[in-house]
Image (cartoon, coloured by chain):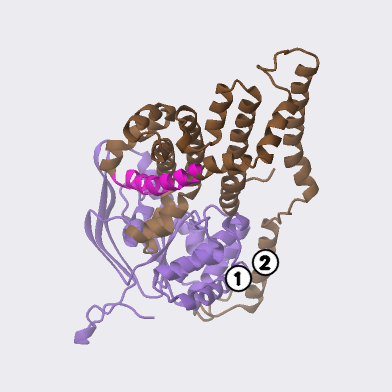
Amino acid sequence: MASTETTDPTAKDPVRDSGIAGVEAGLDALETTATAGTSFRQTFVNKILPPIVAIAVVLVVWQALITFKIVDDPAKLPSPSDVGNEFKDAWLEGKLLEYIWTSVSRGLLGFLLALAIGTPLGLLVARVKFVRAAIGPILSGLQSLPSVAWVPPAVIWLGLNNSMMYAVILLGAVPSIANGLVSGIDQVPPLFLRAGRTMGATGLKGAWHIVLPASLPGYLGGLKQGWAFSWRSLMAAEIIASSPDLGVGLGALLENGRNASSMAMVFEAIVLILFVGIAIDLLIFSPLERRVLRGRGLLVKG
Amino acid sequence: MATTLAKAADGTESVEYAARIEHVSKSFAGPAGQQLVLDDITLDVAPGEFVTLLGASGCGKSTLLNLVAGLDAPTAGHIGTDGRPALMFQEHALFPWLTAGKNIELALKLGGVPKNDRHDRAEELLELVRLKGSYGKRVHELSGGMRQRVALARALAQDARLLLMDEPFAALDAITRDVLHDELTRIWAETGLSVLFVTHNVREAVRLAQRVVLLSSRPGRIAREWTVGIPQPRRIEDAPVAELSLEITEVLRGEIRRHGQH
């Protein structure tokens, strides 16, 4: 190449330069793969059909136990149709939705309170060394304490009322939410923090633009677990502390069934508790989590 | 191309630099007491100059870059830069929760660019790195070469006068790397930026730079400097590039050999 020519770096060799853009476009096209969306048929076969089959199998086995008189005592195992009738009666009396709403409204309100307390608490534990050393281990330890253990002291302190329910929910869910945020923040890659710092994102700006969004997947995991803990704590509280003033939630329904020796009612309550827990997870937390993970390329389709 | 005019007031001697590294030393606490990593480094990067820092492992070239970036403080000596420099890493360091365009906009936002101008400016920068139409792409949807180009666009968005690059192409395949060399040379020429580029690849250093600075290892000292007079655009296969690379490689090997002798 002619080294006698200009040394001006802006001088362009037309033959060479025209090639680069084309090569680059080719490389870009070669190295990016288009992801095709899945059809409804595929979704149905892969995601919806299997749980329906599983439920059907359970019902068939259940009915078989009754039909072939393997279990012969309706007080121990009611038939699926008995439980179905229990649902029908509750629906016709207009009480079914009331049972569900009593518990769900409590559960969600308690969860929101836990969110409002757990988030700043998690931030403090993650960012302030002293706080972390002081209450970090307790917070992790509380996660393994069954929240039903809080019911007796809560009843003694607060009495048989709604505040006692919320107290039990908070003690169950706050540690999960806080711990989720702490582990989310701990897992933020240091490279992101360095990149942020060179861009001027330090202090509060760094927390807002880098640390919080980077820790979102861990935080969402904590929220999901927090909801599961809220719901479990609430059921424990409702079963143990039933009182006419509190209205009939799902836990109280279960307890009423036991008192009336109505196994069908007990089954009804258990199915409803399970159903609500799964429904909230499927309707709120799973889509949220999937969206965040997919946006970051952390979810492999399969 | 604004630069700091340290003594412009008296009109006699104006000192212009994009980065000035004066007698800088850095030591870290190691298992055997204080370990000297950088020893008395003095180096200026002139406005608009492209300098590569070349060295084997353990020469502290990345440490030096961190010091210039202000991510760490020198143990001794002084570093001055013309404004806050932008820094590009070997890993793209793009934020996966933002699209390519939004990554660039975040840098603009943190740099104080008004909200209404950010989108257009981000599109402009994407066009500059030949990624027009990739504004809405997620990081994981981009190839390695495209990610580094977005990272370059994000660094350019900081509107810094000095761009620090820490082996930014080391993890790319050879074909992509060649293309990115061409792009970097073009963008450097178009923007008038000063670049301090760290690499352990001799040919890459010669391909890109106006000046190659060789660091010795443990501790890092400036061993030698070459001014590269080969006109741009160069190619890594060009005979003059290969020739100078050979010469530098010999000196570099000599430096490395010294460590095997004791």
Quadrant into which the C terminus of chain A falls: top right
Q: Residue placed farthest to the bottom in the image?
A: B11
Quadrant into which the N terminus of chain A falls: bottom right
Q: Which mark is residue B161?
A: none
Give me the residue at 40% from left, 64% from top: A199
Q: Which chain is brown?
A: A
Residue A124 falls inside the magenta stretch: yes
Q: Which residue is mark 1?
A: B130
Confirm or deny contact between disc 2 and disc 1 (CB under 8 A): yes
Percent position (x, y) of residue A244? 48, 34
- The quadrant holding residue A35 is bottom right
Q: Dot 2, how many residues are within 10 Å of its Cα: few (below 14), some (14-19), or many (20+)?
A: few
Give me the residue at 57% from left, 54% from top: B172
Give the side of residue A32 with respect to residue A151, left or right. right
Can you say whether A274 is above or below A11 in the image?
above
Q: Amino acid at mark 1?
A: Arg
Q: Which residue is mark 2?
A: A25
Q: Amino acid at mark 2?
A: Ala
Percent position (x, y) of residue A192? 43, 54
Q: Which chain is purple?
A: B
Give, as a single range, the part of the protein colored magenta.
Answer: A106-128
Q: How far apart in space, not on screen, are marks 2 and 1 (Cα)?
A: 8 Å
Q: Nearer the viewer, residue B60 or B134?
A: B134
Tag 2 secondary structure: helix
The answer to whether residue B154 is seen in the rendering is: yes
Residue B25 falls inside the magenta stretch: no
Q: Chain of mark 2?
A: A
Q: Nearer the viewer, residue B132 or B138?
A: B138
